[in-house]
Image: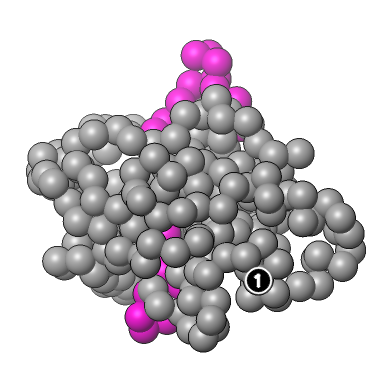
Amino acid sequence: MPLGKISDSMSEMTRQTTGILFRQDKNLARIIYGPIRPLLACAAFMLPVSMFTGCAAVGVAASMVDDMTPRKAQYTPAEIATLVLCENYQAQGLSQIDADQVGRMVWDQMSSRTKIPMISPDTLVEARDIDRAAFSKLTVLQIAKQVKARQVIYIDLQSSATGVATGSDLMKAVVAANVKLIDVDTGRVVFPPDSEEGLPLATETPMRRAADGATRDSLRTEAMTMLSGQISRLFHDYKAGEDDRPSVTDQPLR
């Protein structure tokens, strides 16, 4: 089956994301690069796995992971005032509204699934709206102290892309981010323990058809919703088979 050419924007995202494999090792996610590129490329960034007989093992492995329950948080944060701060300086395809939406969805999941006192996203917006120019110059720690947070789940959106297969109405979206947990008192990154940049995460939507109502905006929102669930599950226990992703109907902050 001819695959056609994928759009340039998606090609770059393919290079960034198809070299990443997440493997659960007790409570710590390990990220393995390099030789696995051909295997993940076989998963067909722009086509369903089922269309590739050589990639059947990938689908089998995925179903096996879904059956593994329960699963532990990779890191359990202290039960102290926590701010979710999401920024989009690296992701040109996403706006501040998109970043706010991701932050709100992560906050919603953490509020409902943990006992951690989470600072409302409205508090963050109110602080930002007092003087946006001055706020944009604040460091993460300064922002945290302004809203009286003692730790920060910091989400640095890295990239976003939506692509369409040539000659088809099939499309999908990808979003990538770095995530870290920062202790405000010390300024130290407590998770992940071995990276100041944060843990790289990436998620992609299933293939959708324009004929079924899929649009670039709806796919981007779906990808951000999936990413939000992925981020929150770093910090709380969950069952692998359950769908605890935030609702795509959640409204972005404006």
Query: Label 1 belongs to which residue?
Result: 145
Determine whether the residue tagged by mark 1 lies in a helix, strand or loop.
helix
Q: Is residue 125 rendered to the left or right of residue 56?
A: right
- For the point 41% across and 48% down, the residue is 110
- For the point 53% across and 81% down, the residue is 185
Quadrant into which the C terminus falls: top right
Q: Amino acid at mark 1?
A: Lys
Residue 244 place in picture, x, y as percent: 33, 35
Q: Nearer the viewer, residue 90 or 106?
A: 106
Quadrant into which the N terminus falls: top left
- For the point 50% across and 34% down, the residue is 222
Q: Is residue 204 visible?
A: no
* Region in magenta: 192-216
Q: Is residue 251 rendered to the left or right of residue 186?
A: right
Q: Nearer the viewer, residue 160 or 189?
A: 189
Compared with 104, 31 (above or below) is below
